[in-house]
Image (spheres, helix red, strand yellow):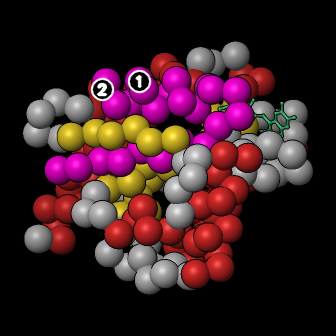
């Protein structure tokens, strides 16, 4: 089983979380690749893989700068992603009450619109909680992987 973690980040926190998830999940049976979203376009979803969107939120509830090209390309091209299964580990800060975790939310809504199916609940990390996101990521991704294995077994 292959898992591709797509990272949207401004100051590296989401990347740190992705690295923890890769370490936790990559065990030979599951092959994990972490990729920064910089320079990616919608064709990244053509590969045979499960996807984990690991992204923070910036500006007025926007995706980070390095995620904009991918997000905009998906919006413009609207490919059929009905073959895609994905999870979302979002990072944000509840201090931004109106736009809390909108980066992950935007990707989640767009992928669903394009026919992709989410596995598990979208995680919403809160930087103001004092809980370290990379620790939460470790636990969260193991639960997510269990659900992903169940989902792919049901499919085949
Ligand atoms: C200028 C700025 C704007 C932000 N805007 C939002 C926001 O609208 N909503 C939100 O939930 N978090 C917002 N955040 C919080 C970040 O998403 C959060 O700190 C996250 O952990 C940063 O992860 P990163 O280092 O991977 O970019 C903002 C942070 C900064 C510095």
Q: Residue at x 58, y 32 (%)?
A: 14
User: Would residue 141 be found to the left or right of residue 112 on screen?
Assistant: left
How far apart in space, not on screen, are marks 2 and 1 (Cα)?
6 Å
Rendered image quadrant of residue 69? bottom right
Report if residue 143 is visible in the image. no
Ligand 1's quadrant is top right
Q: SS of the residue at dot 2?
A: helix
- The spot of residue 121 in percent (x, y) is 49, 52
| Magenta region includes residue 4 | yes
Q: Residue at x 58, y 72 (%)?
A: 74
- The spot of residue 20 in percent (x, y) is 41, 24
- The spot of residue 154 in percent (x, y) is 16, 67
Residue under label 2: 24
Residue under label 1: 20
Name the outermost residue toward the front: 39
Asked if the residue under mark 1 is in contact with the one under mark 2, i.e. CB atoms within 8 Å, the reply is yes
Q: Residue at x 58, y 47 (%)?
A: 38
Vertical side of 98 occupied by 84: above or below: below
Q: In the depicted view, which residue is nearer to us: 93 or 82? A: 82
Checking the image for residue 94, the label placed there is none
């Amino acid at each position: 089983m292959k898992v591709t973690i797509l990272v949207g980040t401004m100051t590296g926190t989401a990347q740190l979380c992705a690295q923890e998830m890769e370490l936790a999940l990559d065990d030979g049976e599951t092959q994990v690749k972490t990729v920064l979203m910089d320079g990616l376009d919608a064709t990244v979803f053509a590969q045979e893989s499960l996807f984990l969107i690991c992204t923070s939120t910036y500006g007025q509830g926007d995706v980070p700068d390095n995620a904009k090209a991918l997000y905009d390309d998906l919006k413009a091209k609207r490919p059929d992603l009905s073959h895609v299964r994905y999870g979302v580990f979002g990072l944000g800060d509840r201090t931004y009450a109106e736009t809390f975790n909108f980066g992950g939310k935007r990707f989640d809504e767009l992928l669903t619109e394009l026919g992709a199916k989410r596995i598990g609940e979208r995680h919403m990390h809160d930087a103001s909680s004092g809980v370290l996101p990379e620790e939460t990521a470790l636990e969260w991704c193991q639960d997510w992987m269990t659900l992903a294995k169940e989902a792919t077994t049901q499919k085949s």
